Amino acid sequence: MCLMLWTTGDVVNMLMAGAILLGILIHVSLFYNESRLQTLVTGLPPIIGAVTMIAWSTFSPELRGEDKIVAIVALGTLVGYLSAGAYRSLMTRETLRALVVKTTRLAAEDPLTGLQNRRAFVDLVTSQTQGGLSPILAFIDLDRFKPLNDQYGHSVGDEVLKEISRRLVQPGVIASARLGGDEFAVLIAPSEVAGDDQRTIQSLHQRLTAPIDSEAGLVSVGASIGWVGPGKVGLTVSELFHSADVAMRRAKVDRLGFVEFDTIVDSAALASSAIEIALRQAVPDGKIRAALQPIISASDGKIVTMELLARWPGSGFPRDPAPNEFIPIAERIGLLNDMLWSMLNQALPTVAASNWSLAINVSPSQLTSRLFLARLSAVIARHRIPPQRIELEVTEQVAFRNVVENCEVLDEARKLGFRIVLDDFGAGYSSLAILDRLPLDKIKLDQAFVGDLRDRAVTQKIMRATVALAHELGMVCTVEGIESAETAALVASFGCDQMQGYLIGMPELVEPVACRLQRA
Ligand code: C2E
Ligand code: MG
Ligand code: MG
């Protein structure tokens, strides 16, 4: 249309064509620009064009007086529109940019103390380690913060946290963060001078533990610091954090104030916390597998019972952790029952298809849970297995802690039809009185008995007497750890009722249902 108007050769028409073209250009320059530079580049030609046209129409002898005024007003309006629009678009962009900067800062910041939050701090440590730098990482956990918070209220607690975060800023500290609650972390530039790093941490500890002036008067909190020295190149960020955390826990438990991570001293704790992290995932994912080991009758060699044992194949560790390593952790973090239900669901179909009993190892903490027996009864009922076919293996631990409550639960279990077995008898410190104290149906003599049975006449006499004692008390007697035919024959000659051990059968993983079905 602009072209058509322009080709008429009439000045007014040509001016209109120019004004329409300018309007389009101005509009495009205002709406589709993304930066100041773009606004400038696209806005400048229309402005120059408009100004030229204003000058032309002002001085053109071909235009009449009224036409000149109309053209100048129209073109002036266009320039005004362009200037106002450009100004508004620039201001909106500035406001948005400020908003983005603020949001990014808030997302990386702990709102109470203004320190970096965990995510930002992890990002920073990641970028430092990826850049080949190796600063000192220190984890700080305040001591006695919770009681202080409870006693004086949250406003004093907040004041203390803010003051602590101010004290974290000291020469040499590259960055500080609040990881959550009363946990902080700092990155410190390492020193070339021997012993300087230790002194920096010591002075940090002194600063943090100095009394704090608050609205409740002078209050003091302690601080436990675990730090990882420089030169730990090759550790991943999560290993680095883990190491600092483990050292911090040692500082706290041993009341040392501050402690440097030590590969030898802290390795067990490091491994167990690595196991803990993996276990939290493995249990809900059903990665803990059920294995069954046979227990046979000494008289005819037939399998009477299978013992349910936990296995963790494909754990991801260089060596799959043994039950003795992960069961206590599962117990501490409250996952033992979930693990047991999952293993029972794997093993019970196999047991249901046989006439064996199933022996389950039960830890003391499981017994103290009121719902344990009810849940166990429900799980076995689902597989149509009566309680009479389930043996609960407990250790002497149940006689040491909460013995009255434990005996009540064991009595109740027996009333429901479960049988109670004392596992690892003779391995611990218990006296014979335990046999009187606990309601038992069976005892399992520990494998320590059979180690070098053949060569030890006294051990043989003790075993013979113990088997007789168990029979006298009306209990069945099993011997575990049978690894050779000689031991088996000897044990059988003492009158023991049942045997278990590698000679008789190794613990075998229960095949998952899918595999069994496929094979069938
Ligand atoms: P335990 O109940 O006394 O189980 C017997 C342990 O001796 C098993 O070790 C078994 O593999 C091992 N064993 C069996 N026959 C022989 C043998 O002839 N020679 C030797 N040297 N060892 C033999 P495992 O599976 O490593 O379990 C160790 C302990 O961990 C168990 O001792 C039990 O107390 C506990 N445990 C295992 N699975 C579970 C579970 O699912 N729940 C609970 N609460 N504890 C479990
Ligand atoms: Mg056992
Ligand atoms: Mg045992």
Image: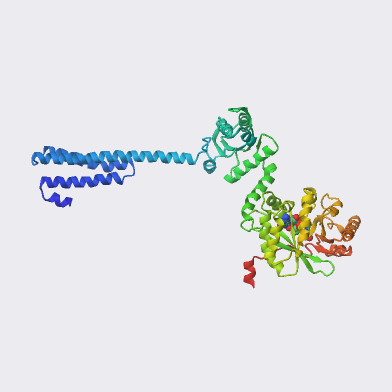
Measured along the vertical axis of the image, is residue 1 above or below residue 474? above
Residue 332 coordinates in the image, percent (x, y): 69, 49
Residue 476 coordinates in the image, percent (x, y): 84, 62
Confirm whether residue 461 shows in the render.
Answer: yes
Q: Residue furthest bottom?
A: 520
**Total marks in image:** 0
Identify the image's colour scheme: rainbow, by chain, secondary structure or one colour.
rainbow
| Position of residue 86 in the picture relative to residue 73 (left or right) | right
Name the one closer to the observer, 324 or 349: 349
Q: Quadrant of residue 479?
A: bottom right
| Position of residue 281 in the picture relative to residue 361 (left or right) | left
Residue 222 coordinates in the image, percent (x, y): 65, 32
Residue 252 coordinates in the image, percent (x, y): 67, 37
Residue drawn at (36%, 38%) of the image: 94
Name the one closer to the observer, 435 or 155: 155
Confirm whether residue 236 shows in the render.
Answer: no
Measured along the vertical axis of the image, is residue 329 above or below residue 389? above
